[in-house]
Amino acid sequence: MARYTHTVDNKGRVIVPAKLRESLDGVLIVTQGIDEGFLAAYTPEQFDSIKEQILHHSSTGHEIRKLKRDVLGSSTVCEFDGQGRISVPAFLWKQIQVEPGEEICFIDVFDKIEICSQSFFDKNREEETPLADMDLSRYEIRGL
């Protein structure tokens, strides 16, 4: 995982970190994240896979309808401009309480990129339980 910070400009644009751009093909699909305070950014291929999984389920369940509205319905194709910026719509910045001029974090978690405000990230780090205090044994991840 890598974390990068950049500032949102007055038009809602933000520079995608160069290290992330290297592995992307000039476009990200940005949508509401599952966790409060986060947007999620996917490659088109990653997003298509998620979309197909959601659409595979019947719309009779409340949770699926909410997923469709919140994740699929708010998804936006964000193409990189010549300076490596993406333009994220104001309604998505509002979802994570980001205003123009504020710093945001790009967090590369490998299966997606999470985006949050720098202040939200800092506050969560202070309030989160440290990994050393968590029981991670049920995940059977060796070598940590």
Image (tube, rainbow, N blue to C red):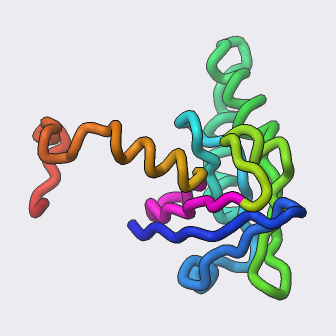
Q: Residue 25 colored magenta?
A: no
Quadrant housing the C terminus: bottom left
Picture quadrant where residue 60 is located: top right
Outermost residue to the right: 11
User: What secondary structure do most residues of the magenta stretch adopt?
Assistant: strand
Closer to the camera in the image, 64 or 96: 96
- Residue 105: in magenta span: yes
Residue positioned 16% across, 41% down in the render: 136
Residue 135 in the image: state x and y as whole percent. Answer: 13, 36
Image check: 133 left or right of 12? left
Give the quarter of the image for residue 143.
Answer: bottom left
Question: What residue is rendered at 53% in x and 45% in y?
Answer: 120
Relative side of 26 to 34, left or right:
right
Task: Reply above or below: 79 against 18.
Answer: above
Residue nearest the observer in this picture, 117 or 144: 117
Relative vertical location of residue 112 with respect to residue 35 in this rendering, above or below: below
Q: Residue 47, percent across and down? A: 67, 54
> Residue 122, image x and y in percent?
44, 50
- State left or right for residue 144 relative to residue 60: left
Please provide the residue range marked out in magenta.
102-115
Q: Nearer the viewer, residue 4 or 81?
A: 4
Q: Residue at x 11, y 57 (%)?
A: 142
Q: Quadrant of the N terminus?
A: bottom left
